[in-house]
Image (tube, rainbow, N blue to C red):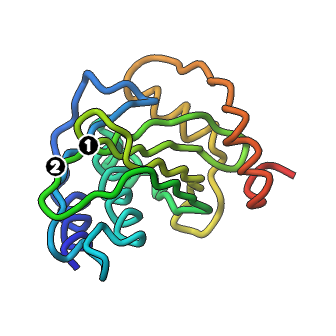
Amino acid sequence: MTRQIQLALAAVRPRKADPSVPVLGPSITRMRVHPGDLDYYWHVNNGTYLQMMDVARTNYMADIDALGALKERGWYAVVAASTMKYRRSLKLGDRFEIRTRVLGWDERVVYMEQSFWRDEELSARGLVAGRFLHRDGSRVPAPDVIAFLASLHGREVEEPELPDDVATWARAVDVAPR
């Protein structure tokens, strides 16, 4: 419940835009493990990681000053697919950060990496395929979204080559273009 409230606050009262964060990121969200984040084994529950990632993606959009601009256009993001790899447990009281960045895009989705770091050690890595929709229900092509976000900053963005592991995953979960 705590992370749902945190997400609502991040969306309704976003943090101030950070001009030092480029359109492709990284954006940093700092957090601390709360009692409600824990599972029976006293480490962060796997589902809680996804909620934390929701908060961090919202903070990323706030950092690049995109929340209001996307809302004005009637565009919003949904998660088409996600996956996680866990390396080290996060436990009660641990301070950590989530580094959110755009890895690339295709016609349909934007691919993001969200990595969890504690004391400069990687704890977990999440991949997210995000699709953008218009409030009328139509899909917004990912290149249009990236071009719009770049225009907010008065610059163009070079499309990075999608890492092989991400491209393979996208095909496996059927979010890659057909």
The correct choice, above or below, for 21 with respect to 165 in the image is above
Point out residue 39 in the picture as x, y percentages from the top left corner.
30, 78
Please tell me how crowded label 2 is: few (under 14), some (14-19), or many (20+) other residues with Cα within 10 Å.
some
Place residue 92 in its image quadrant: bottom left
The correct choice, above or below, for 155 with respect to 87 in the image is above
Q: Residue furthest left?
A: 93
The correct choice, above or below, for 111 with respect to 25 in the image is below
Identify the residue at horizontal 57%, vertical 68% (top origin).
Answer: 136
The correct choice, above or below, for 144 with respect to 59 in the image is above
Instruction: Find residue 118 and name its label.
Output: 1
In the picture provided, is 93 more to the left or to the right than 177? left
Point out residue 31 in the picture as x, y percentages from the top left corner.
18, 52
Q: Nearer the viewer, residue 73 or 55?
A: 55
C-beta proximity under 8 Å, tags 2 and 1: yes
Q: What amino acid does circle 2 point to?
A: Arg
Residue matched to label 2? 95
Q: Nearer the viewer, residue 43 or 162?
A: 43
Q: What amino acid does circle 1 point to?
A: Arg
| Quadrant of the frame with the N terminus | bottom left
In the picture provided, is 11 more to the left or to the right than 106? left
In the picture provided, is 105 more to the left or to the right than 127? right
Count of numbered marks = 2
CA separation, marks 2 and 1?
A: 7 Å
Q: Residue furthest right?
A: 178
Identify the residue at horizontal 30%, vertical 67% (top origin).
Answer: 44
